[in-house]
Amino acid sequence: MKRSLVVYDGSNPVFRAAAEAATGGAEDVRAVRWTAEPVQAFLEAQFDDRPFAFVVVDDDTVHVGEAAVEWLLQRAAVAPAVVDGLKRAYATGGGAFGRLVHGRTISDLTGSFELVDDAADHLDALREVHEIPVRDAGGDA
């Protein structure tokens, strides 16, 4: 089973706490920092760039910006009107918010994109779910 990945800015404790709250306890989704080396290599392979944006990788789709906000909120069963409002807020206020809070402007890249094979290779270790084996080291149940 592959986990979905939520790529976020881990430089701020508030965002780290929000990422943990959004993904904590879920076996099928993992929060990873934008600055992580595999994430940077993934972004370069996927977009020929390293866009500073909120990103979700789900199955073979990469959601960026407003699409990532929508994916996360729908997963949390947030009301559609609230989802639409927060997507608009991301679109209109994301740049200023990014400069103020992150010290950089977020990328204007937004939408859902097919995952490129070369990019997927960089995420394999982050997406794998490791399960505890049923048998002990001696082979007994």
Image: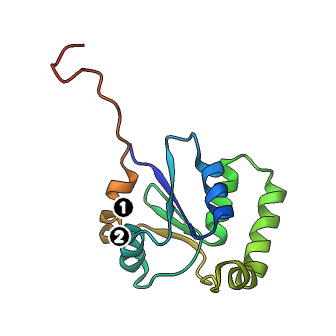
Q: Quadrant of the C terminus?
A: top left
Which residue bears the numbered disc 1?
Answer: 123
Between label 2 and label 1, give the one nearer the viewer: 1
Q: Which residue does the image show at 49% across and 44% down from the upper left?
A: 28
- What colouring does the structure picture have? rainbow
**Residue that carries the numbered disc 2 in the rendered image:** 119
Amino acid carrying label 2: it is Ala
Q: Check disc 1 and report its element: helix, strand or loop.
A: loop
Is the Cβ of the residue at disc 2 closer than 8 Å to that at disc 1? yes
Which residue corresponds to the image point at 63% horizontal and 72% vertical from the top-left?
65
What x and y, as percent, mark residue 31?
53, 56
Left or right: 53, with 140 as reference point: right
Q: Classify residue 71 by image quadrant.
A: bottom right
Q: How many marks?
A: 2
Q: Quadrant of the N terminus?
A: top left
Crowding at mark 2 (Cα within 10 Å: few <14, some 14-19, many 20+) = some
The residue lying furthest to the top in this view is 141
* Position of residue 122 measured from the top left corner of the image (x, y, whole percent): 32, 66
In the figure, 107 relative to 86: above or below? Answer: below
Q: Is residue 102 left or right of residue 119?
A: right
